[in-house]
Image (tube, rainbow, N blue to C red):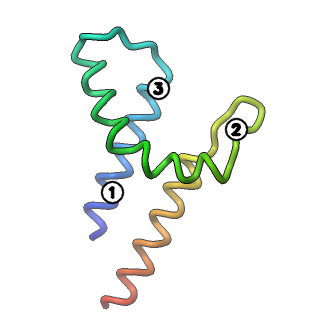
Amino acid sequence: MSTIVNFYEMLILAYILMSWFPLREGGLAYDIGMVLQQLCEPFLGFFRRIIPPIGGLDFSPVIAVIALNLVSRFLIGIIL
């Protein structure tokens, strides 16, 4: 369970880092960015609706990762 959560956290981190740079359509980086967007945006979008950007900074990924860890620890606690 924790391996899946760690992997998803890395996907979110990669998606956030790639969003800082302009990507040209048609390249490999663009394709990777689109796959990451499809995987991460549904989860991050939920938190973006709750927490709007503050001063142009989007803190929703931080809250999303914290929530993911809390749910993961809760589920692991129930299983064990």
Residue 45's tag is none
Image position, residue 13 (x, y; %): 42, 40
Q: Residue at x 38, y 89 (%)?
A: 78
Name the front one of labels 1 and 2. Answer: 2
Q: Quadrant of residue 58?
A: top right
Name the front one of labels 1 and 3. Answer: 3
* Mark 2, residue position: 53
Q: Secondary structure at mark 1?
A: helix
Which tag, 1 or 2, sits closer to the chain's start? 1
Which tag, 1 or 3, sits closer to the chain's start? 1
Separation (CA) of disc 3 from disc 2: 15 Å
Q: Quadrant of residue 12?
A: top left
Residue 6's tag is 1
Q: Residue at x 40, y 72 (%)?
A: 72
Tag 3 near tag 2, CB within 8 Å: no
Q: Amino acid at mark 2?
A: Pro
Q: Residues within 10 Å of mark 3 (few under 14, many from 20)?
A: few
Q: Is residue 36 above or below residue 61?
A: above
Q: Secondary structure at mark 3?
A: helix
Which tag, 3 or 2, sits closer to the chain's start? 3
Image position, residue 41 (x, y; %): 43, 42
Separation (CA) of disc 1 from disc 2: 25 Å
- In the drawing, does residue 56 fall left or right of residue 79? right
Q: Is residue 63 above or below residue 57?
A: below
Q: Residue at x 39, y 44 (%)?
A: 40
Q: Is residue 28 above or below residue 64?
A: above
* Mark 3, residue position: 19
Q: Amino acid at mark 3?
A: Ser
Q: Residues within 10 Å of mark 1 (few under 14, many from 20)?
A: some
